C-alpha cells in the first residue's frame, strides 16, 4: 500500500511535465472543419484556437474613488 502511494507521488510530477511542447497542428491527411456559414475563407488552425470575445471578455478595472449611494433596485424585494 505504501509502495503504491510512494510510486503515485513520484509519478505525479512526471505526469505534469508531459504538457504541450509545440503548437497544435492538424493531423496529416485530416482536413480542418468546413468553412463557417457566411465566411469567405477557411480559417487556419491558429484562428480556430482563439477564443471569442464572449468566451473571454475583458475585465472592467474601473475603480471607485469614493463611496456612492446605490440606485433603487425594483427587484430587491423583502422575503415573503
Image (spheres, grey):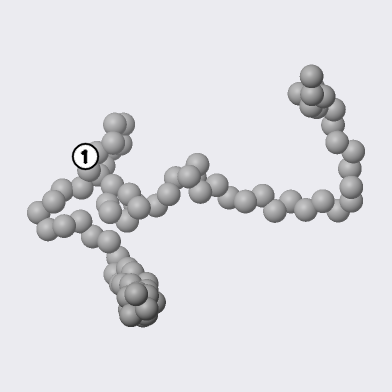
x 27%, y 61%: residue: 24
Q: Nearer the viewer, residue 9 or 64?
A: 9
Q: Residue furthest left?
A: 29
**Residue at image location 85% in from the left, 27% down from the top:** 72
Image height of 38 relative to 65, above or below: above
| 51 to the left or right of 4 | right
Give the percent coordinates (x, y) of residue 69.
90, 38
**Who is closer to the viewer here, 37 or 30?**
30
Name, please, the residue furthest toward the top.
80
Q: Position of residue 21 (x, y in %)?
A: 30, 72
Name the residue nearer the viewer: 77 or 11.
Answer: 11
**Quadrant of the image occupied by residue 71:** top right
Find residue 70 and report its horizontal and vertical position in percent.
86, 36
Residue drawn 43% across the image and 49% down it: 51
* Residue 4 visible from this viewpoint: yes
Q: As drawn, which residue projects farthest toward the front?
A: 1
Classify 62 as above or below 38.
below
- Percent across and percent down for residue 64 are 82, 51
Q: Quadrant of residue 37?
A: top left
Q: Is residue 17 visible?
A: no
Q: Which residue in the structure is indicated by mark 1?
A: 34
**Quadrant of the snapshot with the C terminus:** top right
In the image, residue 44 sits, relative to residue 38, either above or below, namely: below
**Badge 1 element:** loop
Amino acid at each position: 500500500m505504501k509502495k503504491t502511494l510512494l510510486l503515485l507521488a513520484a509519478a505525479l510530477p512526471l505526469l505534469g511535465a508531459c504538457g504541450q511542447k509545440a503548437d497544435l497542428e492538424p493531423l496529416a491527411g485530416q482536413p480542418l472543419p468546413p468553412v463557417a456559414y457566411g465566411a469567405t475563407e477557411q480559417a487556419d488552425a491558429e484562428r480556430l484556437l482563439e477564443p471569442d470575445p464572449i468566451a473571454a471578455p475583458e475585465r472592467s478595472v474601473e475603480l471607485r474613488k469614493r463611496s456612492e449611494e446605490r440606485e433603487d433596485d425594483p427587484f430587491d424585494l423583502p422575503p415573503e
